[in-house]
Image (spheres, rainbow, N blue to C red):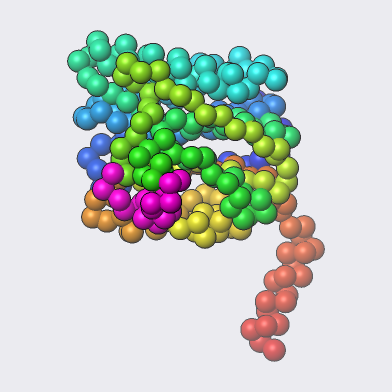
Amino acid sequence: MTNRMPCETACLADIGAREEQQDRVEVFADEMALLIVLADGMGGHEGGAMAAQVVIDVAREQFDAFIDGKTPLQLTDIVYCAHERIKITGAELGLSPHSTCVLLHLTDTTATWAHVGDSRLYHFDNGRLTERTIDHSMVELMRLQGRLSEEEMKVHPDQNRLFEALGGNNLPEVETGYADNSENDGFLLASDGLWENVSDSELEAVFKAQNLDEALRGLVESAKTKGEPECDNISVAVARHRRATPSLGLRISRAFTRFREVWV
């Protein structure tokens, strides 16, 4: 099916320095919309990976049933359905799995998102970071209280202490958000393995790059290098409006200009 959305997307996951990949990230698309889903599993060997995969599976099952005007509710339904499935499956396997999640639904004019935990959504305007989701974590609470800076959050020993997650006995509190989606807007979803190890300026640079896939590979490599020797799993996804391909005449003109700069 041909996608008519004016957005281009890219996603990437890396195991980092861990023995198991417990992050999951996926992009679903039809003619009218995109659904980007990122989950960071927790719960020991196999449990975390299972929990994150459940989030992806439930999103895939429900994406085709989205109805205009009900997007926040439907994103919340995905989260609650995944939560129940993680809880039930974990009990059957004798595991205690949990997962964070962040979901972004895009049409040509609107962006709607939902999140639980410390996997983040970043919103950019003309390549400049304008807002991000608020983590459900102890260190985020400390930052909001003025006790930690943004940078101190990334290295604090309590960074992984969450008070909201999918799985377990407590129903998670889902936060949703909404924004217009225009040619100036861009969105980035990231697990903590990425955002702990890169700067805001590195995130902004992704939206200035001509090749989105190459930009993400560079961003992930930067996170891995800075996170050594114990870098967490990394996952990231990006959506931005498509870059226009220069016309043949313009490309020739640019090539001629570069030729003159070298030889004149």
Q: Residue furthest right?
A: 249
In the rendered view, tell whether residue 37 sits above or below residue 141.
Answer: above
Residue found at x 52% / y 29%: 175
| Residue 261 shown left or right of residue 151 in the figure | right
Q: Is residue 15 visible?
A: no
Residue found at x 70% / y 71%: 255
Q: Is residue 130 visible?
A: yes
Tell me the quadrant of the picture where the N terminus can be found: top right
In the rendered view, tell whether residue 180 sits above or below residue 69.
Answer: below
Tell me the quadrant of the picture where the C terminus can be found: bottom right
Residue bounds of the magenta highlight: 143-158
Percent across and percent down for residue 90 are 27, 16
Q: Nearer the viewer, residue 218 or 231?
A: 231
In the rendered view, tell whether residue 201 sits above or below residue 136.
Answer: below
Percent across and percent down for residue 184 are 71, 49
Percent across and percent down for residue 232 are 30, 45
| Residue 249 shown left or right of residue 14 in the figure | right
| Residue 91 shown left or right of residue 184 in the figure | left
Task: Name the quadrant containing residue 260.
Answer: bottom right
Residue found at x 50% / y 56%: 200
Task: Name the quadrant containing residue 9.
Answer: top right
Q: Magenta segment: does it hold 97?
A: no
Residue found at x 23% / y 55%: 229
Q: Nearer the viewer, residue 29 or 143?
A: 143
Percent across and percent down for residue 135 are 44, 39
Q: Nearer the viewer, residue 180 or 106?
A: 180
In the rendered view, tell whether residue 64 sits above or below residue 189.
Answer: above
Q: Nearer the viewer, residue 213 or 94?
A: 94
